[in-house]
Image (cartoon, coloured by chain):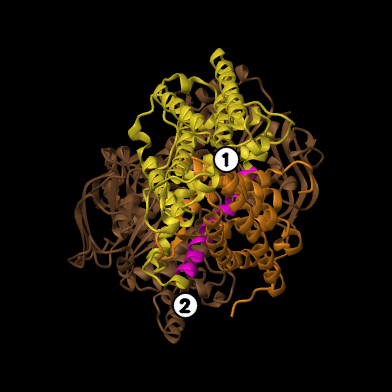
Amino acid sequence: MAAEMLSYIDRKSPVHQLTGVTKLICFILWSTAAMLTYDTRILLFLFLISILIFIISKIKFEEILFVLVFILVFLFINNVAIYVFSPQEGVKIYGSSHVLFEISGRYNVTLEQLFYQLNITLKYFTVIPAALLFIVTTHPSEFAASLNRIGVSYRISYAVSLALRYIPDVQRDFRNIARAQQARGLDMSRKEKLPKRIKNAASILAPLILSSLNKIDTISNAMELRGFGKNKKRTWYSARPFQKSDYFAIALFTILFIVTLIITFHDGSRFYNPF
Amino acid sequence: MKENNLSIKTIVAIGIGAAVFVILGRFASIPTGIPNSNIETTYAFLALMSIIFGPVAGGLIGLIGHALKDLIFYGSIWWSWVVVSLLVGFLIGLASKSIDIESGEFGTKKIITFNIVQVIVQAIGWFLVAPSLDILIYAEPANKVFLQGLVVGISNMVTVAVIGTLLLLLYAKTRSQKGSLDKE
Amino acid sequence: MRKRVIEFHNFSFKYYSQKNPTLKNIHLNIYEGEKVLIVGPSGSGKSTIGHCINGLIPFSYKGEMTGSLKVMGQETKELNIFALSKMVGTVLQDPDGQFIGLTVGEDIAFALENDCTPQKEMFEIVKDASKMVEMDDYLPASVHHLSGGQKQRVSLAGVMVDKVDILLFDEPLANLDPATGKYAMALIDKIQKETNTTVVIIEHRLEDVLYRHVDRIIVVNDGSIVADMSPDQLLTTNILEETNIREPLYIKAVKYAGCKLTEDMHPADFNQFKADLCRKNLLEWFEDSNPKTPSKEGKPILELKNISFSYSPGHETIKDVSFSINKGEMVSIVGKNGAGKSTITKLICGFEKPSSGSILFNGKDITNETIKERSLKIGMVMQNPNHMISKHMIFDEVALGLKVRGVAEAEIKERVDNTLKICGLYPFRNWPISALSFGQKKRVTIASILVLEPEIIILDEPTAGQDFRHYTDIMEFLVQLNRQGVTIMMITHDMHLMLEYTERAIVFAEGRKIADDSAVNVLSDIDIIEQANLKETSLYNLALKTGIPEPRKFVERFIEYDREVRQVGSRDAILY
């Protein structure tokens, strides 16, 4: 149960110094670019840049290792699944077939399939460091202010802040409740039969959910008493002013984004075809 | 929501709802016995919140909760599925008016309505939207993602039907008027 | 004439969900710069008065309101909650529900943010406010690293930023350990003197509030004001006793001794109290008493041997703790917040695994047994009953643990009915749990553990948030269980509970056991009191002050006598 979660890691680095707004915009641009493109060259290029940013951020590899291990396992299973379900997907996309070695019919290993799966993996590798970096270098307090700054209403931005604020509390309550119920014999692990497991789960969830609903009442009273929602706008204690580096970073990422789109779509296909 | 703006209570419900979504999504899944496939209890909770607080809250709990869960625990966001959570939360929430859980009454008719709605909504989400987005964004093979959607969708329909209905029943009872209770 | 800041005039209020009005024809004036304490048992309407002052009524809780309530000269129903919040700053009871920001600075700034205060100005105001509550070194600290007392101080700073005219505290002591509670009262006093704000405190722990001067006490009972007078005057009457509010212990002792209290003896302030005048009575009363029966010796049922534990490597939460509990004992576990009390109980129940050491039950090593196996021997009742209740009906809730263990239907019925009878819940067995009070819910959770027939029950803060009557009910009920052979361990912050009901107390500080002695001895050892954030009892100090020999014996004598008197009075209450 002692699952680790990613959280802000305090360091002094150029990446940390950027405001939350900048990092949020860059993160969105980056993710969109990486999601749209399938051009191997661009993916490779973006991947290298993300490694570079990672080094600049002074985040240590060990600090995010547990997530990486999880993602690698996921990617491995996903790759196997893709191969099992659609071993000729690459041939379909690139329109040629270079068989490397034969297994049997459909499952013959082709260069195209390997290249296609390499692309998929690369794509995850491009998206992941950016998201990881965003979460470990942005102070959660800046989150809501940043969302508000890029145009999300402050009410919804504040809901995000509340979620971040109360996740550890809910986790603590969940642990306590689950164990107390377990002590009464309610188990939702493999030791019980499946239908009973599901029923027990409902009994474990009920106290957590009902007490969370009570919490909603208390918190909304507290917020109301302190004037939340009084004005159309609100200011943010933890917002940070833009520096030169912020403008620079946003400009750089915007250019990167546009270039990516141009290279990806200039020939009408998201895929780079070396064959 | 009577006002145009979301009420404070709805905002808080979104925040707390998202926090609970994150924790349930990470810790409260029921192992099925088949490796790597757990029954998620999250959607039962999401359905409950949508019915209580309506479509906007439901949708935003799905969006924020799922996105934060992915970010905090897995370091990256699987947008295709996040969108489905948003959609499921929003669409189930559309039934909140007709079910009117605050009345304290959640009889057979309403249970059936709720379940028809959740099955349709989740069918759209898991059988259609999730796989389509997977193909669009990640260019994954069609047959793989549709099968994935089918398995996930059916298991979520079952959990919402069982746990979601149970939670709604329990919640409805806490809403009922105290009436004339007598000691026996 | 002094300015009236709060004026209730013939004011009544009825919640829509309730049949009868909660407040009935209230007349009450509170003047500028006054410090007023509102006391009353649960359900008396004291919190409702608070809600009316800060505007949660009628803007958040709906109901029927008649008569007039003016705050700062303005009729509240013609204002809105935001305008009211500029005049009345509220510090709520639940420190976690009230602390909304992620860091100290942010939370203090919350109201300013909502007012669109420019950031620069905000930094300055926040800095000043945090200094006032002595939290200025913690501005960047995350909420998750703060203690309950610190959170409360932040909440106080958070309402101070608005330069409010009135500060309203809703049960400020409920979640604090005794020493922190004392500190909180001193801080409130200091702030009031510096800013000349009007302070309204709603609390039922009277003695703890009177640690600092209070101008006036309002006693609320059953929706009406039954007393409105100076603390000195109030303590000379029987009003507190009649409304089931616990009087300060030294007052109670003096009254038992038959000493007549008058206002000019200044009974409300212990330091000024002319206790000498009662010396003779006290001495006579003391000598009158019979010596106490010595405590029984039993066989150890639970033994902890050299237990250590850490949540994260390098930081030990529990350090080499050993103790043993005898069969049939009733023991208190005390210590400041975060000292490791809850962790110890988690280790005993198997919720966590110790990193070294062993746990023995009836001489048998159970260190490696699972939660479920241990739950048949050791039952754990959590502090918040809402964290345990998952069924709608009382019967089903209590039966749950037996059902999942596959006990036969007929046996379930018999055992549940029996348990419900023991717990005084049998008449309510077909009630929905949502219709019960907090204290009754607590009893349901005790019943749901009891039905599994454990030999030891561990309770986390069994009486937190309970008024005196419910406190007595629950504790007397536990005493009865104890007499039937159930061994009981309690985590508590209530010094009087520990004195009154448990012979032995185990004291924790910084993850170590620092004392394991009789409750009376623990509370007369200044060293331990300071290390563990406890509070000396005013009985002991009274004995010192009046020069009674053997102050410890005096404390014991009081406890014994008080128990007898109250048992006669509360027997009906126990059975309902």
Magenta extent: A197-221
Image x and y of residue C539, in percent? 37, 47
Q: Is residue B151 magenta?
A: no
The residue lying toward the viewer, choosing from A134 and B34, is B34
Q: Three-letter amino acid code at disc 1?
A: Leu
Q: Is residue A211 above or below residue C57?
A: below
Q: Is residue C334 visible?
A: yes
Mark 2 — residue?
C421
Question: Of the numbered discs in the image, which one, if any, rests on residue C155?
Answer: none
Image x and y of residue A135, in percent? 48, 34
* Labels 2 and 1 touching (C-beta < 8 A): no
| Circle 1 chain | A
Tell me, what hue is chain C? Answer: brown
Image x and y of residue B159, in percent? 55, 65
Mark 1 — residue?
A162
Query: Mainly helix, strand or loop, the magenta region?
Result: helix
Left or right of C19 in this view: C487: left
Q: Three-letter amino acid code at disc 2?
A: Lys
The residue lying toward the viewer, choosing from C514 and C222, is C514
